[in-house]
Amino acid sequence: MAKGTLLYAQSGGVTAVINATASGVIAQARARKVKVLAARNGILGALREDLVDTGLESAAAIAALAHTPGGAFGSCRYKLGPLDRDRARYERLLDVFRAHDVRWFLYNGGNDSADTAWKVSQLAAEFGYPLSCIGVPKTIDNDLAVTDNSPGFGSAAKYTAVSVREAALDVQAMAETSTRVFVYEAMGRHAGWLAAAAGLAGQSPDQAPQVILFPERAYDEAAFLARVDKVVKKVGWCVVVASEGIRDKDGRFVADAGGGTDAFGHTQLGGVAAQLAARVKDTLGYKVHWTVPDYLQRSARHVASRTDWEQALAVGKAAVEYALKDMNAVMPAIVRTSAAPYRWKIEPAPLHKVANHEKTMPAGFIRKDGFGITAKARDYLQPLIRGEAPLPWDRDGLPRYVTLKNVAVKKKLPRWEG
Amino acid sequence: MAKGTLLYAQSGGVTAVINATASGVIAQARARKVKVLAARNGILGALREDLVDTGLESAAAIAALAHTPGGAFGSCRYKLGPLDRDRARYERLLDVFRAHDVRWFLYNGGNDSADTAWKVSQLAAEFGYPLSCIGVPKTIDNDLAVTDNSPGFGSAAKYTAVSVREAALDVQAMAETSTRVFVYEAMGRHAGWLAAAAGLAGQSPDQAPQVILFPERAYDEAAFLARVDKVVKKVGWCVVVASEGIRDKDGRFVADAGGGTDAFGHTQLGGVAAQLAARVKDTLGYKVHWTVPDYLQRSARHVASRTDWEQALAVGKAAVEYALKDMNAVMPAIVRTSAAPYRWKIEPAPLHKVANHEKTMPAGFIRKDGFGITAKARDYLQPLIRGEAPLPWDRDGLPRYVTLKNVAVKKKLPRWEG
């Protein structure tokens, strides 16, 4: 065994392949004879000294982890303050690290998590404790800077493109006497990456989705309705994909228009899809159906992308290597070394260039009319959903997902009252 | 070639495997050297003499049809009146049948379609035209009488169980600092079959879905909220699956509570999931997410059930055999010949026993507390989602679905003005 412990934790919204990264981390560390603990519920587990010993999991369980969605160790949404204003928390973190001889800390998450990882990476210099902190990328939103794409996005993108293509076949069959317009709500509050991925379902403007609404463009109701009507009149039916985060020219979220509270003060949880569907129905008179896949789009491991899955594994393995080289404040980033044929490699990127930056879609990815993706976007997105990542199925017809034992490590410190 | 033409049509909501039935029909008829025409958009195509010649499709296309979702010939929602009151329509239908030497008519649909098929089957006696009419079962709702289950249901059931299991892993990972309650809206206006299928995702009451709401039970808000709260306090999080058609004790649809129109007279398209989510949030204060898969659940061929797929093919083939034996007013029904191991066969059932009947869930399938399924339900449902039905994927990462040529047959009659 190498001297010291590697601590791994998951943070932010989970994905269909974040556990593949975890599996990559643990397998690689085992190969290098390094002990791996995992924090329960991200940085919270580290603060609480709520750690589990991954050494007690079988090799088969760690292999199965690579095809299990969700976050096997629990995740969290939790932000650390700046070093000078949140000192007590950082000191507690160091106490836990010291108590368990944690020399390497791998934090697996998105923008906010990269920020946390970056702050933790500064502990070494600030407190003189020898720690190597590596951020490990993950997010279905694909909004991480520096890296060509984010692990988790490709699988959600594939789910989106496949679902839209399948649903479109349904709508097409029923259009004459039933539903003419179908609205699909994609995740993405600020960046329309997943909505854009839906564009892969069709090859020409007449194929579904005929209308995509991006948060990068102001929602113009009149233009939207005119476009839907035009498509229905030409094609017979229309599939709309809308980012949950679209806003009108005054910056108001379209989703909020249907929300608020009712006459009894009860919350009305609307959503973009229901809202757009209602406008189409009222204005154009077409029968409408709508879908909000919500968490299904980020947990559907059964339809994961091979590219995404391989990259998720690769960033996990690279992170361990960076750690063992005592690199600090870096993140394994995906670099596209060739567009056609698509090739990629993993390279370290400085964490501070990732933390708190948000990568929206390049303007050149959205068609001039604002309702679809360009060839450039297609070239970028297509390889990310390529390939299947099959999984074992149980005789009962359900995917064979693993539940880890997650045996708690004995606490050595007083309870954290933070 | 045998003398006469077989006419096939699809009706009602389509499924992930109705095209497998179509493929079975065409392949079997080809093997028996019988010509197959298909009506575009169900019975409407027959009335309009809008027919396509399936003989112009390659064997490869017909094979690919077996794994393509949607309805390849178009479907419709259209009801024929009784023979005595809708005589002009039936006479037109006969004119079309005569013009194209249609001796066998196969109508592939659910309850309403079985009614149409039954009415058409009476034409032989009524007008002295030699016609054999066979109803072919299909519906994700599983509410067809006589048959043990309906083709289309098994795949939608598998989609539901897989999606709920996957989403639950997501919720579980995030529960401490984010979403505690997740609401999944399943199709099913009158019968809770799909909601029940979600129950296959878990094995014990603490596993997701911890709460299922069936249309067969009156919705009791206080009991529902108390149950959700109890689950969250015990498990840490809760997954709710609700049938879209649940109603309160006065018969009011829960989905309607959030619908209606807003202050501007605009339609508010609500839904059960959003409504329940809002009540949980307001009353219990938990963060909630919700999903409405809508058409995705009935078009997701990529996660189809092998059992379902095989049965969909089998009813198509059996229907051709019944037709060629000049049987009339029957439907190939699925008979469960053995529970363990699960075995089934196809047998003819009288159409009038299927038409307009609706099979709701047996009372013994719903747990006494009303929030889950019994062992009996599990035994019935489990084999129906068993097995995978893999499909070819293109290099672009999307399923390889076929688009038929659907070459129109030359019209011989004047235009129908019905």
Image (cartoon, coloured by chain):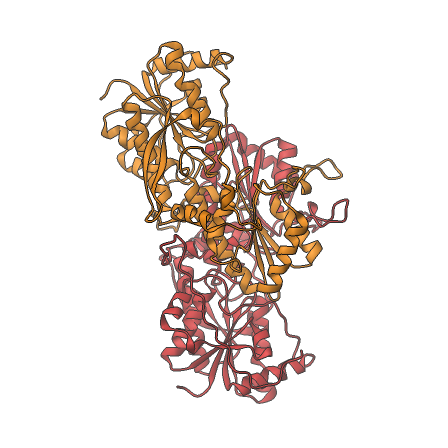
Chain colours: A red, B orange
Q: Is residue B142 left or right of residue B323?
A: right
Which one is nearer the viewer's eye here, B402 or B287? B287
How many labels were placed on the picture? Answer: 0
Q: Where B401 sits versus B121, above or below?
A: below
- Residue B135: x and y in percent read 39, 27
- Residue B337: x and y in percent read 33, 40
Which one is nearer the viewer's eye here, A39 or A316? A39
Residue A58, quarter of picture? bottom left
- Residue B178: x and y in percent read 61, 63
Residue A319, quarter of picture? bottom left
Q: Is residue A319 left or right of residue A98?
A: left
Q: Is residue A384 left or right of residue B316?
A: right
- Residue A412: x and y in percent read 56, 86
Residue displayed at 38% across by 47% down: B383
Q: Where A27 sits versus A131, above or below?
A: above
Residue B43, quarter of picture? top left
Residue B313 showing in the rendered view? yes
State the quadrant of the N terminus of chain B.
top left
Residue A160 showing in the rendered view? no
Residue displayed at 27% across by 31% down: B28
Which one is nearer the viewer's eye here, A190 or B385? B385
Q: Where A51 sits versus B118, above or below?
A: below
